[in-house]
Image (tube, grey):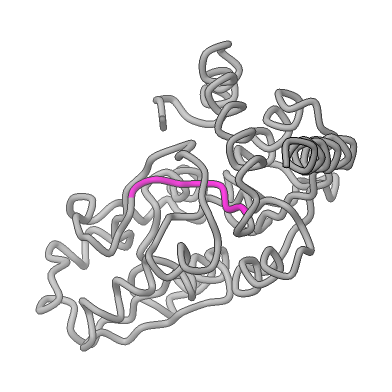
């Protein structure tokens, strides 16, 4: 019996060591600046990308990062097309039934953005018939469908398309992550828009972003958690944070 147990443990150890020798395949969205986007050189860039790279370094793994459409990103993880999803993903009960999550790696809140000269109230009653956009299959789209049923909802393929609708005047408001929208508000295109009201508080709006791991990959999840702690303690996380944001998002 002891020999059998030792053989099993050895097999697990060998399997994990083989896994460590393989590149770590990571999926991100690529359409969620400043967290993930395509830069002028046609390369993936952003906070999520840099965090992915330093986590790989902390785990002594090579990184292979690819952009995946948001609506298919969990499905691809389930099908073993990649090992991790680092894409500003909130933990929800529905997602937890399909994948596991690491500890959080940043926090944020949701808020309406639009022309402040047109909107002072953002209650469900005040926004009846108002055209509101956000990305589909997100916690923000779930929130809008549950809380603003009498508004005209435009759920786009990704968040950049929601902003495009706002700029073109095809929607009146967007529901956004407070951090994600900063670059837009500071740009020429976003100059006439601003935050409306206070950040929203709801059980449907989770304020923490996690890394998704395929079910059953407990060793990988634990290794990522250890790497998150390491980059927090050694100052690497803060350096990346300051590059993108004037305040801590942890």
Residue at screen point 44% across, 50% down: 181
Q: Position of residue 105 (x, y in %)?
A: 49, 36
The quarter of the image holding the C terminus is top left
Q: Position of residue 237 (x, y in %)?
A: 56, 22
Residue at screen point 10% across, 79% down: 125
- Observer-nearest residue: 10 or 98? 10
Residue at screen point 58% across, 49% down: 33
> Considering only vertical position in the picture, is 207 above or below 78?
above
Left/right placement of residue 14 relative to residue 246 reads right
Span colored in magenta: 207-213
Instruction: Examine the structure image and report whether residue 151 is included in the region drawn in magenta.
Output: no
Question: Residue 35 lies in what quarter of the image?
Answer: top right
- Observer-nearest residue: 164 or 101? 101
Query: How many marks can you see?
Result: 0
> Considering only vertical position in the picture, is 131 above or below 18?
below
Q: Where is residue 71 in the image (x, y as percent from the top left)?
A: 60, 74
Question: Residue 200 lies in what quarter of the image?
Answer: bottom left
> Considering only vertical position in the picture, is 154 above or below 246?
below
Q: Main secondary structure of the magenta part?
A: strand
Which residue in the rendered view is the most extreme toward the front?
1
Question: Residue 117 lies in what quarter of the image?
Answer: bottom left
Q: Where is residue 17 in the image (x, y as percent from the top left)?
A: 84, 34
Residue at screen point 85% across, 45% down: 41
The quarter of the image holding the N terminus is top right
Which residue in the rendered view is the most extreme toward the top?
234
Left/right placement of residue 142 relative to residue 123 reads right
């Amino acid at each position: 019996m002891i020999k059998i147990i030792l053989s099993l443990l050895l097999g697990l150890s060998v399997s994990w060591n083989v896994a460590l020798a393989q590149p770590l395949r990571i999926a991100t969205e690529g359409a969620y600046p400043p967290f993930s986007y395509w830069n002028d050189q046609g390369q993936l860039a952003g906070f999520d990308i840099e965090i992915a790279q330093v986590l790989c370094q902390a785990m002594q793994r090579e990184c292979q990062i690819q952009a995946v459409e948001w609506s298919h990103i969990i499905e691809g993880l389930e099908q073993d097309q990649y090992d991790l999803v680092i894409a500003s993903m909130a933990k929800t009960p529905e997602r937890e039934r399909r994948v596991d999550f690491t500890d959080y790696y940043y926090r944020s809140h949701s808020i309406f953005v639009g022309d402040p000269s047109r909107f002072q109230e953002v209650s469900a009653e005040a926004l009846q018939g108002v055209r509101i956009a956000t990305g589909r299959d997100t916690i923000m789209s779930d929130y809008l469908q549950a809380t603003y049923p009498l508004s005209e909802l435009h759920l786009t393929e990704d968040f950049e398309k929601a902003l495009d609708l706002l700029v073109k005047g095809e929607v009146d408001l967007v529901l956004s992550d407070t951090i994600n929208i900063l670059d837009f508000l500071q740009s020429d295109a976003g100059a006439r828009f601003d935050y409306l009201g206070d950040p929203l508080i709801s059980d449907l709006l989770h304020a923490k972003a996690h890394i998704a791991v395929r079910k059953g990959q407990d060793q990988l999840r634990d290794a990522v958690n250890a790497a998150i702690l390491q980059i927090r303690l050694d100052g690497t996380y803060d350096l990346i944070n300051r590059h993108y944001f004037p305040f801590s998002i942890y």
